[in-house]
Image (cartoon, grey):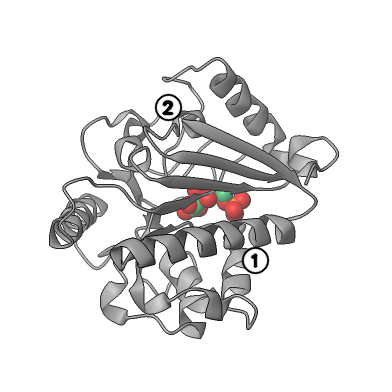
């Protein structure tokens, strides 16, 4: 695992660095394989990134029709609910870019339960990779955030979903942070199979969680209590893009 940690002045700079990484990897993947598989993150931090990708400056830099979009985790609410991560992606990114509707893999939150949605979403993911001739279930890029409690995606501390070692997608009961709704989430086996993983995190409230993660990674602890520490790509790259308030140091560009 190659870990790259960069401290940047602001969320805007985190968004710009992430967008540049995405352009570079999408261009290469599409040239080589004709497809780029992108896993979006929820929460508020990615908003700046999605707005930047939708901008006149960045929108033309990616062949969006070759991108398959997935959601790393989702709240078990309708897609038009203000808590929906899909709605966030729709409103801040997808509505502005020329994407292929058949390549947006939404979590089926209309099913009877989060468990049923997780099973169906895992089937969608497996079927997609089989359809592209890939036996290796490896996303090109996964975007992740960090909660102040150290969670990532919807893998919360001391909850069963964070301990899942076989399944790719599971239902997750709410953690301590809002919103208190059931979730559907990628598991660590699926996350850690990615070619590139980018954490975007900002804000002093996450400083303690970030320090714990860095400590766990430095000591190569694989079963850490802090869920975000367990993001350790098997063969891929790991980027931590954080702001100076979170890292509690001067930014080092
Ligand atoms: C979610 C996200 C979650 C998020 C972190 C950070 O569904 O809420 O996937 O994992 O990335 O909670 O959220 P902020 O970016 O809002 O701080």
For marks 2 and 1, the one nearer the N-term is: 1
Above or below 108: residue 194: above
Residue shown at 31% from the left, 80% from the top: 101
Above or below 37: residue 153: above
- Location of residue 124 in the rendering, given as x and y in whole percent from the top left corner: 19, 60
Residue under label 1:
48
Residue shown at 55% from the left, 20% from the top: 216
Above or below 242: residue 126: below
Residue shown at 51% from the left, 75% from the top: 93
Residue under label 2:
158
- Location of residue 158 in the rendering, given as x and y in whole percent from the top left corner: 42, 27
Q: Distance between the residues labelled 2 and 1?
A: 30 Å
Residue shown at 22% from the left, 45% from the top: 136
Q: Is residue 137 left or right of residue 234?
A: left
- Location of residue 116 in the rendering, given as x and y in whole percent from the top left corner: 18, 54
**Which one is nearer the viewer's eye here, 38 or 147?**
38
């Amino acid at each position: 695992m190659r870990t790259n940690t960069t401290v940047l002045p602001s969320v805007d700079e985190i968004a710009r660095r992430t967008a540049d990484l995405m352009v570079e990897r999408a261009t290469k993947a599409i040239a080589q394989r004709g497809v780029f598989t992108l896993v979006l993150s929820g929460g508020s931090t990615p908003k700046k990134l999605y707005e930047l990708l939708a901008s006149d400056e960045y929108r033309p830099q990616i062949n969006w029709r070759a991108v398959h979009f997935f959601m790393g985790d989702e709240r078990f609410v309708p897609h038009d609910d203000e808590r929906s991560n899909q709605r966030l992606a729709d409103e801040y990114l997808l509505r502005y870019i020329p994407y292929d509707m058949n390549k947006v893999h939404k979590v089926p939150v209309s099913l009877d339960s989060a468990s049923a949605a997780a099973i169906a979403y895992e089937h969608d993911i497996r079927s997609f990779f089989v359809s592209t001739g890939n036996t290796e279930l490896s996303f090109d890029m996964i975007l992740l955030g960090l909660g102040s409690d150290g969670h990532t995606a919807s893998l919360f501390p001391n909850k069963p979903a964070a301990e899942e070692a076989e399944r790719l997608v599971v239902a997750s009961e709410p953690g301590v942070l809002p919103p208190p709704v059931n979730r559907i989430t990628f598991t660590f086996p699926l996350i850690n199979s990615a070619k590139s993983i980018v954490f975007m995190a900002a804000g002093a409230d996450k400083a303690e969680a970030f320090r714990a993660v860095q400590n766990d990674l430095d000591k190569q602890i694989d079963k850490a209590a802090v869920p975000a520490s367990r993001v350790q790509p098997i063969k891929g790259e790991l980027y931590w893009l954080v702001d100076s308030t979170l890292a509690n140091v001067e930014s080092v560009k």
